[in-house]
Amino acid sequence: MSIIAVVGGGITGLALAHRLRARGKDAVVLEAENRLGGNIRSWSREGFVLEAGPNSFLDKEPATRELAADVGVEELIRTADPAAKARYLYTRGRLRSVPLSPPAFLKSDLLPLGARLRVVAELFTARAPEGVDESLAAFGRRHLGARATEVLLDAVQTGIYAGNVELLSVGATFPQLTKLEREHRSLILGAIRTQKAQRKALPAGAGASEKLRGALCTFEGGMQALVEGLTRALGPAGHTGAKVEGLQPGSGGWRLSVREHGRQAELLASRVVLATPAYVTAGLVRPLDEKLSALVEGIAYAPIAVVHLGFERGSTPAPDGFGFLVPSLEQRRLLGAIHASTVFPFRAPGGGVLYTCMVGGARRPELVGLDEEALVALAREELKELAGVTASPLFTEVIRWKRGIPQYNVGHLERVSAIDAALARLPGLHLAGNAYHGVGINDCIRNAFALGDTLAS
Ligand SMILES: Cc1cc2nc3c(=O)[nH]c(=O)nc-3n(C[C@H](O)[C@H](O)[C@H](O)COP(=O)(O)OP(=O)(O)OC[C@H]3O[C@@H](n4cnc5c(N)ncnc54)[C@H](O)[C@@H]3O)c2cc1C
């Protein structure tokens, strides 16, 4: 009975089971759906490569590289085209490019002059009192001023969390910012000093700053390539169509009730890791500890709809840059769009153009409930008004995530500590996944590896 049961076959569960097996443990994945991968799903249409969830990751997390190499897909990693370097924000009536250096920021018209000068005054910001969990907006207003918060910080968080800047916790969503404040008081001073120290540590020459930031990457054939590699590596240890419906502590371990391909079954495991979304985890732990269940259930999710618009070569100009984001003060219906075929040209065959639009989020959750036709019409209208795209697409695809991205709102860090304290009273039960310590693919893999190493030792 030394099986470790990993419930949920998203990237967290898969990376964890893989790590455990590499460390000699008998780990199995139980995944409710008929495929592994969770949020990660890629497919092709008319030769275009489409993503249901994540599009890319920054190549700066050693665990992600290690995992890709382990499962034989490292050679499928593709770096973004240099044309994708530019980024845009829609503000004050048009798309404006985001300056990539402090002098360029001072000269740019992204913010009005007064707001740019207020950002420079960040140098004189006082430290926040210890132990206060501030919202991203409160932190931003203190450091950068109201306008930069509404335009820049709001857009940056939208690109990751699709959240509400007034609700998200700065410490939970951007711990690097609170760290800079703690260590240097001013973010600008801290950033300059940190960069200097990092540059010293890296060998000089081309590509040094790229190494620091991490190059934007994906897999040829889509993010799914990583899941396919993991599926092959796990072999029969990756069970699909296996929904875990309950768990109970038993003698020396845990008894799981599993509905596998319609049949009820039981699995005895020495340890259980729930790598399921928080709202599923809350239901599974409710009979064990009501308080723990309530804590987990309190992690909100933002819904998000992904609308792909694929255009034939020549029907619309290839857009410049990675894409654009729309700050909420603009009151538009689009959160932003990725210029998917500019970032990764192999995603659109023969010079086609692929826009991947994001709709909804914590800002406009009701829009995710629109039917597909309405979502396509919305995306086309918004692309026309914001980016001047008037051509008719060759095809469209809509993916709706009713509970897409976990929201680390104010209180999240305290909540996670309370969850850990409650888990300490349930030996052999562990929680993992994007609801707790980071939503990015890199976070999920790094945290899965760390948990795997702890459980294996
Ligand atoms: C639209 C969108 C775009 C994104 N873009 C990016 C991006 O570009 N870059 C990036 O780094 N991150 C991105 N993310 C975030 C990232 O994709 C996710 O955080 C990550 O994939 C989550 O992985 P996970 O394994 O923790 O959870 P999930 O992928 O949610 O996996 C959980 C699994 O548990 C299974 N499950 C549920 N209930 C049960 C049960 N009772 N029994 C067994 N199994 C069960 C589910 O079917 C699912 O497969 C994006 C997310 C979304 C939604």
Image (cartoon, rainbow, N blue to C red):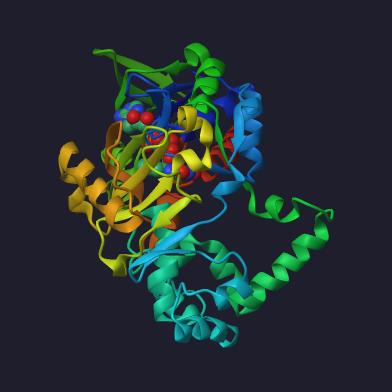
Residue 54 versus residue 166: which sits nearer the camera?
54
Examine the rendering and report whether any part of residue 178 can be seen.
yes
Instruction: Give the residue displayed 49% in from the left and 46% down from the top.
Output: 440
Residue 288 versus residue 300: which sits nearer the camera?
300
Provide residue 14's location: percent of width, then percent of height: 49, 28
Instruction: Give the residue displayed 62% in from the left and 68% down from the top.
Output: 101
Residue 239 versus residue 270: which sits nearer the camera?
239
Quarter-of-image position of residue 400 = top left
Q: Does residue 126 sit above or below 372 in this rendering? A: below
Examine the rendering and report whether any part of residue 360 can be seen.
no
Farthest residue to the front: give it: 314
Q: Does residue 118 sit above or below 76 in this rendering? A: below
Q: Is residue 140 left or right of residue 247?
A: right
Question: Quick one: quadrant of the C terminus?
Answer: top right
Instruction: Give the residue displayed 42% in from the left and 62% down from the top.
Output: 89
Ligand 1 shows up in the quarter that is top left
Q: Does residue 365 sit above or below 43 in this rendering? A: below
Instruction: Give the residue displayed 39% in from the left and 30% down from the top.
Output: 8
Provide residue 277's location: percent of width, then percent of height: 35, 40
Residue 351 versus residue 139: which sits nearer the camera?
351
Q: Is residue 284 left or right of residue 109?
A: left
Provide residue 380's location: percent of width, then percent of height: 25, 46
Q: Is residue 293 left or right of residue 143?
A: left
